[in-house]
């Protein structure tokens, strides 16, 4: 019987994220908007706590046009300056530039008849037989996340190193790192 939530307990927003979103694949769509959003937010999270990003997610959605890749790909220097002045989001020029570049890379991938979902799927690791007992047993990156990061960079994506790629794999359900005994584990 599941006995605890492996993270997020005590904060309603974090609990909801843990219980209903972390490890759940995004809704399929031709523009892969939700996947783009989640990958973008993982990059913005780098060096920060995830709860910070969750609390700012509504502002990120407003600032980045609902993470519509076609709109974000068209952002120019005026948009970058607007984003840099937006106190509701993480104002990091490299991460903002990367998000715009990633929207363009996603559109280029789609123009080639490919989907980002398939890129992630190609790097899915084998399912573990035993769940970790603590997050100390969960790696920051794996051979698969290293390969995914390299593949994404070849496609023109930025700010997607092995650790960010692994965090995205966790968040998107390509890796299940809920701990043994977690209430979400069936």
Image (cartoon, rainbow, N blue to C red):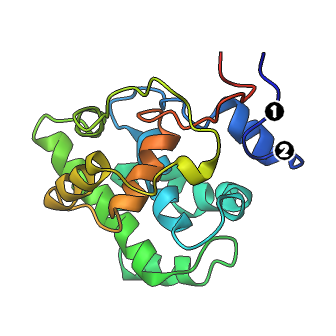
Q: Position of residue 121 (x, y in %)?
A: 28, 32
Q: Residue at x 74, y 59 (%)?
A: 55
Q: Quadrant of the C terminus?
A: top right
Q: Position of residue 6 (x, y in %)?
A: 72, 40
Taking the image as shown, residue 160 lies to the left or right of residue 128, namely left
Helix or strand or loop: what does disc 2 sit on?
loop
Q: Quadrant of residue 119?
A: top left
The residue nearer to you, when weighing 28 against 79, is 28
Q: Residue at x 73, y 45 (%)?
A: 7
Taking the image as shown, residue 108 lies to the left or right of residue 85, namely left
Residue farthest along the right direction in this orientation = 10
- Contact between marks 2 and 1 (CB within 8 A): the answer is yes
Helix or strand or loop: what does disc 1 sit on?
loop
Q: Which residue is mark 1?
A: 4
Indicate which disc, 2 or 1, sits on the residue closer to the N terminus.
Answer: 1
How packed mark 1 is, by other alpha carbons closer than 10 Å (few <14, some 14-19, many 20 or more), is few
**Vertical relation: 4 (above or below) 57:** above
Q: Quadrant of the N terminus?
A: top right
Q: Position of residue 76 (x, y in %)?
A: 35, 75
Q: Which residue is mark 2?
A: 9
Q: Position of residue 32 (x, y in %)?
A: 37, 37
Q: Residue at x 62, y 34 (%)?
A: 21
């Amino acid at each position: 019987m599941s006995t605890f939530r492996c993270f997020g307990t005590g904060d309603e927003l974090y609990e909801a994220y843990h219980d209903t979103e972390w490890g759940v694949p995004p809704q399929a769509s031709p523009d892969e908007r939700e996947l783009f959003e989640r990958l973008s937010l993982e990059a913005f999270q780098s060096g920060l706590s995830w709860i910070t990003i969750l609390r700012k997610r509504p502002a990120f959605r407003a600032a980045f046009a609902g993470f519509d890749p076609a709109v974000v790909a068209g952002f120019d220097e005026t948009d970058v300056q607007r984003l840099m002045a937006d106190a509701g989001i993480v104002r990091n020029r490299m991460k903002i530039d990367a998000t715009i570049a990633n929207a363009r890379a996603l559109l280029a991938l789609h123009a080639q008849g490919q989907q980002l979902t398939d890129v992630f799927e190609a790097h899915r690791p084998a399912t573990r037989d035993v769940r970790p007992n603590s997050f100390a047993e969960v790696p920051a990156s794996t051979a698969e996340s290293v390969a995914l990061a390299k593949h994404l960079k070849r496609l023109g994506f930025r700010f997607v190193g092995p650790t960010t790629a692994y965090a995205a794999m966790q968040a998107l359900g390509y890796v299940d790192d809920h701990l043994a005994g977690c209430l979400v584990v069936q």
